[in-house]
Amino acid sequence: MRTLDNPNTSDRLARSALARDEAVLDLDSYLAARAEAATSMYTNVERVPLSALSDWYTDDATGSIRHVSGKFFSIHGVDVRIPNALVPHWDQPIILQPEVGILGILVKEINGVLHCLMQLKAEPGNYSGIQISPTVQATRSNYTRVHGGNAIPYLRYFMDRARHRVVADVRQSEQGSWFLRKRNRNMVIEVTEDVEVVDGFHWLTIAQVNDLLGMDDMINMDTRSVLSCLPFIDMNAPGPLLGYDGFTRSQISSWTGEGAGLHSIGDLLSWITEQRAATEVTVEPMPLHRMTEWRYDGDVVSHLSARFFDVIGLLVEARGREVGRWNQPMLAARGIGLVAFLVTRVEGVLHVLVHAKAEPGIFDVAELAPTVQCVPENHADSPPASRPPFLDVVLAADPGRIKFDTIQSEEGGRFFHTRTRHVIVETDELHDHPDFRWMTPHQLTTLLQHSHYVNIQCRSLLACLRALASSTEGGA
Amino acid sequence: MRTLDNPNTSDRLARSALARDEAVLDLDSYLAARAEAATSMYTNVERVPLSALSDWYTDDATGSIRHVSGKFFSIHGVDVRIPNALVPHWDQPIILQPEVGILGILVKEINGVLHCLMQLKAEPGNYSGIQISPTVQATRSNYTRVHGGNAIPYLRYFMDRARHRVVADVRQSEQGSWFLRKRNRNMVIEVTEDVEVVDGFHWLTIAQVNDLLGMDDMINMDTRSVLSCLPFIDMNAPGPLLGYDGFTRSQISSWTGEGAGLHSIGDLLSWITEQRAATEVTVEPMPLHRMTEWRYDGDVVSHLSARFFDVIGLLVEARGREVGRWNQPMLAARGIGLVAFLVTRVEGVLHVLVHAKAEPGIFDVAELAPTVQCVPENHADSPPASRPPFLDVVLAADPGRIKFDTIQSEEGGRFFHTRTRHVIVETDELHDHPDFRWMTPHQLTTLLQHSHYVNIQCRSLLACLRALASSTEGGA
């Protein structure tokens, strides 16, 4: 029913829009609507050898995997050097997707409460079928029609920003160990006009989205990324707070740390500058079949240790998407990842411990990562000195100090059944480490107005941390 | 006399420091000291064929010019594509210098007035001999001693920041048409302790530096870059203003536009995001001798049209520097460049017209450039439609509306006699162009807390604009 831009049907949709605009669902009804949608919107996937992908080929000159159209994305080998890192030199496959896509959430005040227009979307890599996605989630290939599919609903709100209010609009990086310099444009646009609600889309309050973040594999990665960029305090119109209905500004300020902080923003920027100036990451192209630590036999790309991830082939049959059948390579992680924040109160203000982490695909040397970001089982046999800092603090945490613990999915268009445990652990110890700093949520959100400061794992976990603000436990 | 770090002499220097600390010179005495220094501190340069540089060679595999040590910098050919630009495809030589150097100014309040510790420094490319340089101007090769030279005075203040106050600390880009992704770390450190003043260094007030900016080829490029990053309002300790002694905070605020502006900072960030997301700049390596538009005969690299710049060889004999003799390639621009701001008042607040300009060596697609940035004589024969926007507005300006007009030098370590006219023109017309925006000095300075927003030409001109603030004409 992606017929928004079809002049023959838009009148009919417009007539029904006002009524549906107000038809905001309670959470149980929304979950029922999701279950109902799953009967008509799904993907069937079959895992096949990479050599069986009819639309993809391995380029002999560069040893990379490419689409026959030259579009979408490609998979390359790279040789990586990060001096002084735990592992200073390795090779690996990595996804190259230079174009900047749009991840956009449309927001609107309905009955005095801010709502987000969320999309139910099935992606072939999803572990759980349908996930809750931004209003628009479009690569440039999507919206310049490489697919030959239908128009993208609501895209025009994000293309014609002069008519609406821009709440957030910033390019942010994606996984720096899987993507080479990938950025997507994270946008939040507020409208006041009537909005047609087409099939598969629903208005949810921020509180409802936050409740859904407490469930496994429900809110997709792109939504978590965009939500993290939503300012606590509207940068364009100081005063109104976005999505924290029922809280006073002083309650929010005390929780987010507006105007407070163990370190000033200037000192934090200086520390980030130092971290980035001191490290030189070099990433050189290398043919996939020449990598020394990976085997590429034409069917699958795997690490010799059977760790990290595989590059696999998939045949996809989809209903409820623009194109019915296609084939593509995907990354499939081995093991479930872990991202964790240590959080504490400094003079009553919440602080999280972030890590300036260098990764090969990061655009500018290093970005702020969660306290812990790793796949724990990769370190099962590591001696203590080479285990990631604070991993054991998190794994050994008293259950009573674990404030958040769910499994979230990575993006289902590129990653197959790839999942990450998201944990927030309270501590009383003000840990000190030269590559880590305690920052307030407000400081992180201030940096999120700009590109390349906060990595996707940290943004995802920040969205979860913000969800705690709407519970008594987290906000108190 | 670069003996600061020598324990045998530091006591003697420390004893004389207090007296010299207070010996702040008036401008005439400083200019006399500069003339005196020129008798013992200078470079003799001889232009030679590139093939006569004993420490440099052309790499057959990549066709690039490199130092025998593998350090310092190298010169490469690149093939550049910027779709929709006035010139969408070309090739050119470009300097690669991946390491991040330090440009640092030490500041201190003396007799209640903020002073900068400035260095008289001769560089082989300088048009005018000695120029006024930051306290520290060091590539990483410098301070890790590739030269084998002496210790760098005052470097420790910038390495051990915990003991002092960090006023600014941010990596900024350099010329995007001459350098490939070059960044230097721009730092301002405030000290309260006694500082030894070694030969060739002097304390100057910001007002004195501003007066010197009104003279041709006096304040070097690195100083202009660092000065532009000095916040109007101290980001770490709101209240005191840096270097605007004699002005009230409300006078400064009204001039810089704090809290005001034709566009909100959020709308400006969204516009920058749009400009960067819409453009894909591709820069591919290409051997120097394979370039189609340039001739490299082993002696010099020149454009077939004899425009833009040449890559030349220099033998250097220096006094007053760490190393006495060396040889190196340099870029020598053809023609004098022009950078210009159109400025206007919007409801009493100063605004400058900036251009989101894509350049091949820029780190992130496009940065904010002056209203005009070009070499006018390159466009002498261009039809009106392909002339840079606003060039003719600036060239035809009524002399009474020209508020600033001097010639400034590009950095004399890489550029030979390469100079740029800096012009600020007042206008009453609120020009409108999709690639340009009116911004306040305060908004530009806010963005300068972060990397990659404001290009070197815009920073250099912003330093000149700030100099106007201390004159009645500019401040009124």
Image: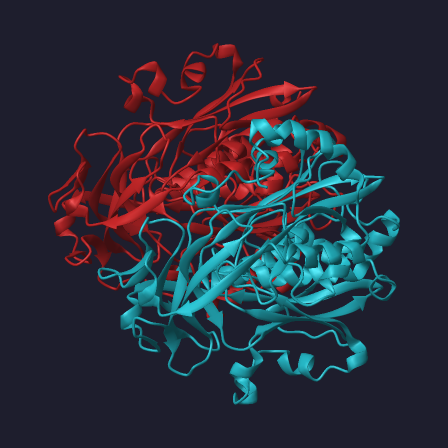
Chain colours: A red, B cyan
Q: Quadrant of the C terminus of chain B?
A: bottom right
Quarter of image, res A381: top left
From the viewer's perspective, tell me whether residue B246 is left or right of residue B63: right
Q: Position of residue A13 (x, y in %)?
A: 52, 61
Q: Residue at 33% across / 58% down in the picture?
A: B56
> Would residue B176 be visible to someone looking at this image?
no
Figure check: A285 above or below B459: above
Quarter of image, res B397: bottom right
Q: How many numbered tags mark residues here? A: 0
Q: Position of residue A10 (x, y in %)?
A: 51, 65
Of the pair A131 and B292, the residue shown nearer to us: B292
Most extreme residue toward the left, as rendered?
A297
Of the pair A59 and B363, the residue shown nearer to us: B363
Most extreme residue toward the front, as rendered?
B39
Of the pair B42 and A343, the residue shown nearer to us: B42
Q: Residue at 38% across / 64% down in the picture?
A: B282
Q: Position of residue B101 (x, y in %)?
A: 50, 46
Figure check: B146 above or below B282: above
Q: Quadrant of the N terminus of chain B?
A: top right
From the viewer's perspective, tell me whether residue B69 is left or right of residue B196: left
From the viewer's perspective, tell me whether residue B388 is left or right of residue B287: right
Q: Residue at 30% across / 74% down in the picture?
A: B297
Q: Position of residue B221 (x, y in %)?
A: 60, 59
